[in-house]
Image: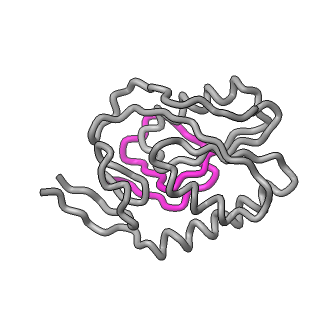
Amino acid sequence: MPEFIPLISRQTIQNRVREIGKQISRDYQGKDLILTGILKGAFMFMADLTRQIDMDHDIDFIGASSYEGTHSTGQIVFTKQPDLEYRNRDILLVEDIVDTGNTLTKIMEFIQLLNPNSVAVCTLIDKHERRKKAIPVKYACFSLEKGFIVGYGLDYDEKYRNKPEIYDLKL
């Protein structure tokens, strides 16, 4: 039976997302911003984040996966391409968790091929335990050293995304 150890409360998440949204609004004022959520994990975070950004912006999604259970396979599979034109626009990739950095590195390389003005990363969780690639995270709601996290969009084999808080999962 899995054990869920509470890490970050719903209220703490909402407060931090509000702060990050205000910072993004200031930093991107006057720019042509596209928030690009990385599916599936970022959908809850992105929904809350976009409501906290007080400026016009577009929303898009890209799908990529490299996980089976709790381990990265090392193989990146793109499951959804962007729908919008990225040329000469400012792209903010919205991710649930930056872990090894492998998937996000491949996504960033792909986005650069679309000739945007800029590409930056906003993540709910910046986790350092298994980092293999240096990822320039511009906005991180929370930084963790270790653990396998679920809830608020984060999953284990497609389960537990619906939990409203963030937990360390012990199997």
Give the side of residue 137 with respect to residue 156, left or right.
Answer: right
From this view, report whether residue 113 is shown above or below residue 141. Answer: above
Which residues are drawn in magenta? Answer: 121-147
Q: Residue at x 39, y 32 (%)?
A: 66
Quarter of the image with the N terminus is bottom left
Residue farthest along the left direction in this orientation? 1
Residue at 79%, 56% (x, y): give it. 56
131 drawn magenta: yes
Q: Decide whether residue 55 is among the magenta residues.
A: no
Residue 30: give x, y in percent of width and height. 87, 54
Residue at the right extreme? Answer: 30
* Left-right relation of 27 to 112: right
**Residue 49: x %, y % from top left:** 61, 60
Q: Residue at x 48, y 29 (%)?
A: 79
Residue 137 pos. (x, y %): 59, 48
Q: Residue furthest front?
A: 83
- Residue lying at 45% horizontally and 48% vertically, measured from the top left: 41
Image position of 163 (left or right of 122): left
Relative height, residue 119 to residue 45 (above, below): above
Q: Is residue 28 left or right of residue 6?
A: right
